[in-house]
Image (cartoon, helix red, strand yellow):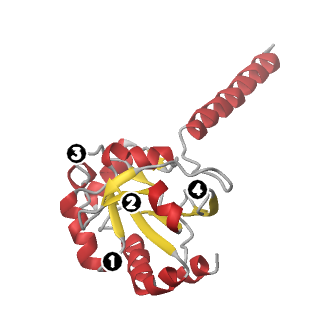
Amino acid sequence: MIGLTFMRVLLLTIWLCQFASGLLAQGQPEGIFLGAKAPDFTGTDQFGREVNLRQLAKRESVLLVFYKGYWSPSCVRLLTRLQDSLSYFTDRQISVVAISPESDSCRALTLQKTRAGFSLLWDSSHLIAKRYDVLQELAESQLARYRSGGIDLVKLNAPNTPQLPVPSVFLIGKDYTVTYRFFDPDQKRRISVKELLQQ
């Protein structure tokens, strides 16, 4: 009888763990996949220009970059290197567009740090990140860790909610198809401009 009860408890525990893992996985972003049609969007960049993906992609390919904000060293480093190599992308008829939920004042700091000559778009209500399935929900414990490091996402992203995109890159062809993607939700790997230029 004790052995039977133990087996039932064990099986129930395993099932609950699998169920919980499934629920967690459902909430994780995956990023749009290679071969998918890129969702359209329109936004205003730091120069006051209206940027529409469909109109832009009619003329040339688009390198779409999702970044966290001016406070992320790895994101600033990538944006700076993209700016340093911008002429190479231009020569290959590729427009660079970077997207973040950070507020206008924070975007100004990103511009100051990176000297970006390409478009930096504010993602109002995280609409673009949601369409590209890169929006990451943050638990209160994660937000607390950010705050302990002096990063208050409630203030930095206002009026957006304190969520972040997974730093990711998509290359979109003239037929609006995703021809390359870099998406690492664990954020353990960094992409290089050299890798992007080889696409």
The reply to whether the C-beta atoms of the residues labelled 3 and 2 are less than 8 Å apart is no
Q: Secondary structure at mark 2?
A: strand
> What residue lies at 58% left-to-right and 76% top-to-bottom?
196
Residue 164 x/y as whole percent? 39, 52
Residue 83 x/y as whole percent? 39, 81
Q: Which residue is mark 2?
A: 99
Residue 91 vertical position relative to residue 107 in the rendered view, above or below: below
As drawn, the label of residue 159 is 3
* Of pointers 4 and 1, the one earlier in the residue sequence: 1
Q: Is residue 145 left or right of residue 21?
A: left
Structural distance between the alpha carbons of marks 3 and 2: 16 Å
Residue 120 vertical position relative to residue 25 in the rendered view, above or below: below
Mark 1, mark 3: which one is toward the viewer? 1
Name the residue type under label 1: Gly
Q: Secondary structure at mark 1?
A: loop
Q: Which residue is mark 4?
A: 176
**Residue 56 vs residue 149, the one in the foreground:** 56
**Residue 79 vs residue 49, the one in the foreground:** 49
